[in-house]
Image: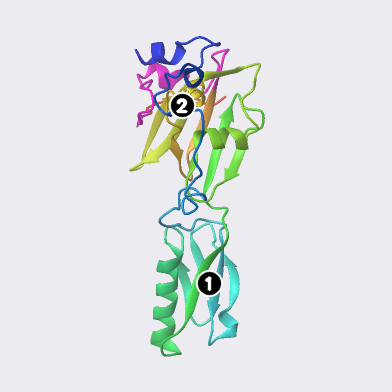
Amino acid sequence: MGLALLSGGCANHSSIRDGTATAVVPVTTLPEPDPRNAIGDISPAYYFGPQDKIDIVVYQLPELTKVVTVDQAGQIALPFVGQVMAGGHTPAEVRAEIASRLGQSIMRHPDVTVAVSESVGQRITVEGAVNQPGVYPVQGKSSLLQAIALARGTDNKYANEHIVAVFRTINNQRNAAIFDVTMIRDGQMADPVLYGNDTVVVERSSGKVLLQNVISAAVPVVGVFRVADAINRF
C-alpha cells in the first residue's frame, strides 16, 4: 500500500492548482506575515558538535577571550580551566561549566559568555539522484526540500522523486522514512523537518540505489520513521 501511494498520481496533476491540497491551504491572496514569525522557526537550543567554533569571552580575563574549536572528541581546552566537554552541550551549559571552574579557582563571580562562532558540526548528507551529492552544514532545523535544494536539486534524468528516504539514528538504531517529494511540492504531504546527522537519499529510477534493501524490508510507510535493518551502498 505504501508503494502504491508513492507511485500514484499524474504528472500533470496539481493539488494546489485544483484546490485539493491537504498539507497547504490554497488561497488567491496572502496576508502579510507576522514580523515576529517572519524569520521562521527558532530552535530552542543549539548543541555543539565536532569542528564547531565557539566564541568565549571572560570579561575579567582577556587571556580567555578567544575563539576555540571543538575537537573530534567533543572537547575544548582553556587556560585556567582545562578540558571542557562541549560536544552535545548547549552554549548555556558550556558557559555554566566554565564559570563554575573559574569561580572555584581564580576569581569570584566570573562574567562569562559563550556563543556559536561557526557551526559545522551539525550536517546533513544528501545522496542518490541529486545534482551535487555531499555533506552540508545546517544550523538548527531544516527541511527535506531545503536539503535537496542544497544539493542543487534532483537529477532530472535519473531521479525518482516519489521515493526519497531520510535516514536518522534514534536511540542507537538506524531508522528510515520514505517521502514523495512530488506530493510535498504539490501540497499533499507536509515538508518534513530534518536535523543534524540526517541522511537524505533520492531514489534512482534504475533501481540500483541505497533504498532497495530498505523497501524489501517493509519500510515504505510514507512519512513514518521505522528501523532500517539492512542498508547497501553504491
- Secondary structure beneath label 1: strand
Colour scheme of this structure image?
rainbow
Determine the residue positioned at 36% across, 19% down: 217
Determine the residue positioned at 44% across, 10% down: 8
Using residue 75 as the reference point, say whether residue 135 is left or right of it: right
Give the quarter of the image for residue 19: top left
Number of other residues with Cα within 10 Å of mark 2, as a class: few under 14, some 14 to 19, many 20 or more: some
Determine which residue is flagged by label 1: 77
Determine the residue positioned at 52% across, 28% down: 201
Disc on the earlier residue, 2 or 1: 2
Q: Nearer the viewer, residue 115 or 101?
A: 115
Q: Position of residue 223 (x, y in %)?
A: 38, 27
Q: Position of residue 170 (x, y in %)?
A: 36, 41
With respect to residue 113, does 10 lie above or below?
above
2 and 1 marks in contact (CB < 8 Å): no
Q: Is residue 213 magenta?
A: yes
- Secondary structure beneath label 2: loop
Determine which residue is flagged by label 2: 26
Q: Main secondary structure of the magenta part?
A: loop
Q: Which residues are magenta?
A: 203-227
With respect to residue 177, does 73 lie above or below?
below
- Quarter of the image with the N terminus is top left
- Quarter of the image with the C terminus is top right
Q: Amino acid at mark 1?
A: Ala
